[in-house]
Amino acid sequence: MTVSLSVSDGAQATLSEASLEFTGANWQLPQSVIVTATDDELAETPVHSVTIDVSSASLDANYADGTVTYLPGSSITFNIYDNEDSGVSVAGLPLYAEEGGST
């Protein structure tokens, strides 16, 4: 069985593996996929997400329907926590400007 993986937004995250191959010799062994968030140097929504789509294919009729039954659904959602800030900081409240003036 081949389990195929793809990320919904390749600009936001990458996968260490695009597919995993399970055979009669390794079906019981864990296989890892590392999801890496892209450090894009853009200040974005503090928390945004990407979806990893998962599908399978097999020559074995017992597993050939394209679903991966041991996963909860055909996709996995990961949250990305942005590490850039907007570059604006406010200190010394209250802030004010007088009419006709500036601060």
Image: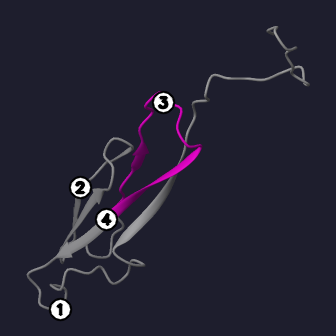
One can see residue 29 in this view: yes
Q: Is residue 22 above or below residue 69?
A: above
The x, y position of residue 87, in whole percent, is 63, 22
Q: Is residue 89 above or below residue 80?
A: above
Q: Quadrant of the C terminus?
A: top right
**Pointer 1 with pointer 4, Cβ within 8 A:** no
| Mark 2 or mark 4: whose residue is earlier in sequence | 2
Q: Amino acid at mark 1?
A: Asn
Marks 3 and 2: which is nearer the front?
3
Mark 4, secondary structure of its residue: strand
Marks 2 and 4: which is nearer the front?
4
Q: Is residue 49 above or below residue 27?
A: above
Per the image, the residue denoted by label 3 is 42
| Mark 3 or mark 1: whose residue is earlier in sequence | 3
Per the image, the residue denoted by label 2 is 18
Q: Is residue 29 magenta?
A: no
| Mark 2 or mark 1: whose residue is earlier in sequence | 2
Give the Cα distance between marks 4 and 3: 25 Å
Q: Which mark is residue 4?
A: none
Q: Which mark is residue 53?
A: 4
Marks 1 and 4: which is nearer the front?
4
The x, y position of residue 53, in whole percent, is 31, 65
Give the Cα distance between marks 1 and 4: 21 Å
